[in-house]
Image: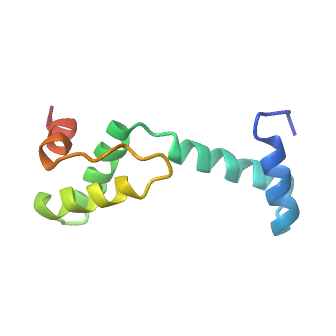
C-alpha cells in the first residue's frame, strides 16, 4: 500500500472490520470522494437522480435541502430559489 494521508484510517478500518487493507483503502477513498463533492455538484447530481426516479421538482427541492442539512460539512441553508439556480443557472 502506498503511503497516503488516510493510511492510518484505512488500517484502522481493516483492523476493525476484517477487510483486507487494499479494500479498506478503496472504501476510504470512495467515502472521501463522496463527501468531497461541492454543494453545486451534490445538488446537480441529486437533482438528476431524483428526476430520473420520476420525482417532481417541488418534492426534489425539499429532499435536497434536507439532505444538505445532514451532510457532515453543511452547506448552509439554501432556499428553493438558490437550489434552482444551481441546477438551471
Rendering coords of residue 49 (x, y %): 30, 56
Colouring of the image: rainbow
Residue at image x 82%, y 63%?
19
Q: Quadrant of the N terminus?
A: top right
Count up the numbered dots: 0
Residue at image x 29%, y 43%?
44
- Vertical position of residue 60 compared to residue 43: above or below: below
Q: Is residue 39 left or right of residue 12?
A: left
Q: Is residue 86 left or right of residue 21?
A: left
In this view, the residue in front, 50 or 5, is 5
Rendering coords of residue 47 (x, y %): 25, 52
Residue at image x 66%, y 44%?
29
* Quarter where residue 6 is shown: top right
Q: Quadrant of the C terminus?
A: top left
In this view, the residue in front, 52 or 81, is 81
* Quarter where residue 7 is shown: top right
* Quarter where residue 67 is shown: bottom left
Rendering coords of residue 51 (x, y %): 21, 58
Q: Is residue 86 left or right of residue 2?
A: left
Residue at image x 32%, y 53%?
46
Q: Is residue 41 left or right of residue 63?
A: right
Rendering coords of residue 10 (x, y %): 79, 50
Amino acid at each position: 500500500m502506498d503511503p497516503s494521508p488516510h493510511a492510518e484510517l484505512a488500517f484502522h478500518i481493516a483492523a476493525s472490520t476484517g477487510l483486507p487493507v487494499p479494500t479498506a483503502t478503496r472504501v476510504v477513498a470512495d467515502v472521501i470522494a463522496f463527501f468531497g463533492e461541492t454543494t453545486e455538484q451534490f445538488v446537480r447530481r441529486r437533482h438528476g437522480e431524483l428526476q430520473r426516479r420520476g420525482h417532481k421538482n417541488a418534492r426534489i427541492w425539499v429532499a435536497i435541502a434536507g439532505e444538505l442539512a445532514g451532510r457532515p460539512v453543511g452547506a448552509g441553508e439554501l432556499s428553493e430559489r438558490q437550489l434552482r439556480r444551481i441546477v438551471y443557472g
